[in-house]
Image (spheres, rainbow, N blue to C red):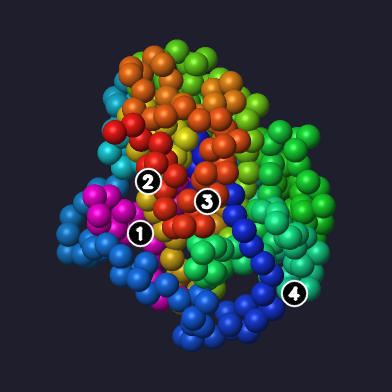
Amino acid sequence: MERIGDKVISRAEITDDASATFADSTVIPDRYARPDEVRDGVVVGSDESYELPVVDMARLLNPEFSEAEIAKLGSACRDWGFFQLTNHGVDEAVVEDMKDSTLQFFRLPLEKKKAVAIQANGFEGFGHHYNRASSEKLDWAESLILVTQPHEQRNNEFWPADPSTFRDALDKYSMEMSNLTSRLTVFMASDLGVEQETLMGTFQGKTQSVAFHYYPPCHHPDKVRKNGRWYPLNPLPGAFVINVGDILQILTNGTYKSAEHRVLPDVEKGRATVVMFQNACVAGIVKPLPELGEATYKAIDHVEYVKGNFRALAEGTRFVDSLKIM
């Protein structure tokens, strides 16, 4: 999964009781239970017909089909805020190495994973990350969060040395995701009617980070919400799920919509996810591109945006909504 135009900031802790908790997923302690969130919104029924957006990179690159596929890309970003990307061109061996290294890491004993544990007041490292700090509820997941780009911002002390393949796998995967972001922004710029260099420039040289999650078995499927309703998402084999981030929503002056989504554990088996976050801004400012008309969002310094987003996460709200010009 990749989230374009956003940055993740989290607070986390290591909890020894989690291993015992996860061993019996039929009993969920209060600190992990979120009944109000699970019941929030209406879930689309299995008897209802709907089609979630899929974009084909091969068609985007083919002059014969590119125009039609760019229109599909634009529609997905405007109406849904996400799409599945097929024929993406990312080296399959790199993807498989990243998957294998991720699973090997989460299979390690807890004491070994603690070697890269998150530090006080930090957000990089291994731990059980808070979803809402104010409620002190924990996600039903083990997580590892790392900064991957630029290279000089990497904190190697948090990059696992066990398994031995992990660092090299992540380095290669990070570069593949950077290249994929560049390819996608070219077509997004075409859809938006702005110069390629304008949109690409908001991403180039900005921070990229990754979140690895392991979800033990539990009793809820994945869903993505649109217009107050949750839509179950069944990932296509070999495809990437691409989410529009909050910053991209602002950059596009609200043309593209950031999707509200949640990942819920599988009923019978554990699962792992690898989520890349690509940051963006205009000369240090988070604001709409001037080419897209009168601004409908307030401009804000990127550092202040990060602080505001952190506070909003702690409160269970969306900071992007507070920047909307009414």
Q: Would residue 20 be seen by someone viewing this image from the given angle?
A: yes
Kind of residue sitting beneath label 1: Lys
Q: Which mark is residue 109?
A: 4
Badge 4 density bin: few <14, some 14–19, many ≥20, Cα 10 Å: few
Residue found 18% across the figure and 55% down from its top: 49
Q: Which residue is mark 2?
A: 259
Residue 292 placement (x, y as % from top left): 36, 18
Residue found 51% across the figure and 57% down from its top: 314
Read off the magenta span: 218-241
Badge 1 density bin: few <14, some 14–19, many ≥20, Cα 10 Å: some
Kind of residue sitting beneath label 3: Arg
| Gap in angstroms between the C-alphas marked 3 and 2 | 20 Å
Q: Which residue is mark 1?
A: 223
N-terminal-most mark, 1 or 4: 4
N-terminal-most mark, 2 or 4: 4
N-terminal-most mark, 2 or 1: 1
